[in-house]
Image (tube, rainbow, N blue to C red):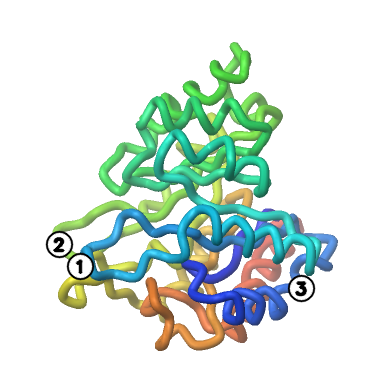
Amino acid sequence: MILIAGPCVIESRENLLRVAEKLVSYHEDESIDFYFKSSFDKANRTSIDSFRGPGLDEGLKLLDEVRRTFGFKLLTDIHDYTQAKPVGEVVDVLQIPAFLCRQTDLLVAAAQTKCVVNVKKGQFLNPADMRYSVKKVLETRGVKEEGYEAAKRAGVWLTERGSTFGYGNLVVDMRSFGIMREFAPVIFDATHSVQMPGAEGGKSGGKREFVRPLSRAAAAVGVDGFFFETHFNPCEALCDGPNMLYLEDLDLAIKDIKAIQNALKV
């Protein structure tokens, strides 16, 4: 299975390498296709005072150091079409943020790189409508056919991260996995799905205690991979701390998932 894990944002070189070192076992696990994730810039924050990260140039240097040190494949998000080319020269997967999932220029620029393009489903969007975002990437890459296998060969993934429900809550509609897998491989973003946007007065809250139950449910329904943001101390994290997993809890979540996947093979 695909596993995407790492801290929400690059807080410092020390913290980045500290988390990366704890994730080496997943990289070495032959049953896992592992990608290390961290953001160089969190451009979509609730407050203008929120920590955003080191920025493009310094962030790419640090991500490249992670690659050289640990041999990881890398994933990070881009927010502007001008970032696609320079970021694509360092990472393996370009991630399109949920609120930007329909931005044509951004999708086309990402598709013009050699990277896998991971499009996060907008919290506001019908899962079935994500086929049009996939199609933008496929057509840019000269792929005329559609469907799961075509997207897999062309390097296009979709990520489910919950849907807006009223104020301050996201809800995961488990039907969306099957709907979106009709036209692309699907990743479940378990940690952002328990986020509570704007719940902590100028910043998002979250309920990490629901990460493992939702992951078990997604494993039972069937997905291609999982996305977990993780930290050695989420309570002190500078971004998305309430929904990030402690590193030791990540291992428990992966054991849950593997047990369910193995049971379904019987």
Asked if the residues shown at circle 3 and circle 2 are in contact, with their CB atoms under 8 angstroms apart, the answer is no
Query: What amino acid does circle 3 point to?
Result: Val
Answer with left or right where residue 242 lies relative to residue 212. Answer: left
* Disc marking residue 198: 1
Query: What amino acid does circle 2 point to?
Result: Tyr
Q: Residue at x 41, y 39 (%)?
A: 80
Q: Is residue 195 above or below residue 232?
A: above
Under circle 2, the secondary element is loop
Residue 195 rendering spot, x and y as whole percentages: 33, 67
* Distance Cα–Cα, label 3 vs label 1: 33 Å
Under circle 3, the secondary element is helix
Near-viewer residue (234 or 147): 234
Near-viewer residue (4 or 46): 46
* Distance Cα–Cα, label 3 vs label 2: 38 Å
* Disc marking residue 24: 3
Mark 2 lies on residue: 167
Asked if the residues shown at circle 1 and circle 2 are in contact, with their CB atoms under 8 angstroms apart, the answer is yes
Q: Residue at x 41, y 47 (%)?
A: 97
Residue 228 rendering spot, x and y as whole percentages: 54, 66
Answer with left or right where residue 19 lies relative to residue 26. Answer: left
